[in-house]
């Protein structure tokens, strides 16, 4: 599923290409026997971060992005600095949850998988919106 959304970045040597690599990993994890969702969370957060930063680098008036890893802050930057518009309040809490889960992955590998997957379901819609904007 994710590889399809990021198909235009397949093997491209930029942040979009990195987003595609994480998307390919997510699709591979879906078909694996791994039951721990923390590894999925790490790659999902990285995919989103690379995608946001690619958009900021290529579509913003400044051609730059901040150093933050917080997805909700990156969405705010995308909305403020590009022509992309969406209701950020629809995604804010879920983007924060994914960022927190990814931070937890780095330290103790113990995350709320059900809550994380509910946030993914919401944020997948944002990926689709952003993909339409980039196309």
Image (cartoon, helix red, strand yellow):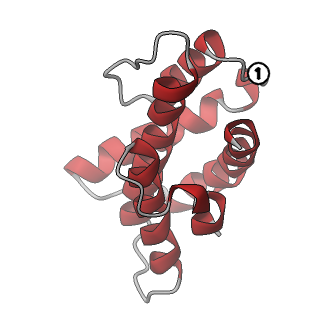
The quadrant the N terminus occupies is bottom right
> Foreground: 134 or 40?
134
Residue 104 horizontal/vertical position (percent): 31, 46
> Foreground: 23 or 91?
23
Q: In this view, does 56 lie above or below 19?
A: above
Q: In this view, does 68 lie above or below 17?
A: above
Q: Mark 1 points at which residue?
A: 85
Residue 103 horizontal/vertical position (percent): 32, 42
Residue 74 horizontal/vertical position (percent): 50, 24
Question: Image point 45% across, 31% down: which residue?
Answer: 53
| Number of dots carrying numbers | 1
The quadrant the C terminus occupies is top right
Relative to 111, 73 lies left or right: right
Q: Is residue 108 above or below residue 96?
A: below
Question: Image point 50% across, 44% down: which residue?
Answer: 48
Label 1 crowd (10 A; few <14 / some 14-19 / many >=20): some
Question: Image point 51% across, 61% down: which residue?
Answer: 113
Relative to 71, 1 lies left or right: right
Question: Image point 45% across, 26% down: which residue?
Answer: 57
Q: What element carries label 1?
A: loop
Residue 50: name its quadrant: top left
Residue 78 horizontal/vertical position (percent): 59, 21
> Foreground: 88 or 5?
5
């Amino acid at each position: 599923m994710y590889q399809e959304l990021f198909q235009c970045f397949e093997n491209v040597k930029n942040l979009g290409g990195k987003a595609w690599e994480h998307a390919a990993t997510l699709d591979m994890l879906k078909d694996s026997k791994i039951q721990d969702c923390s590894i999925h969370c790490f790659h999902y957060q990285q995919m989103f971060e690379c995608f946001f930063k690619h958009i900021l680098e290529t579509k913003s008036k400044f051609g730059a992005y901040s150093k933050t890893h917080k997805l909700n802050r990156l969405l705010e930057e995308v909305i403020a600095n590009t022509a992309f518009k969406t209701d950020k309040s629809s995604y804010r809490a879920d983007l924060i949850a994914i960022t927190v889960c990814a931070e937890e992955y780095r330290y103790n590998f113990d995350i709320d998988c059900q809550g994380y997957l509910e946030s993914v379901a919401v944020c997948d819609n944002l990926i689709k919106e952003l993909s339409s904007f980039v196309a």
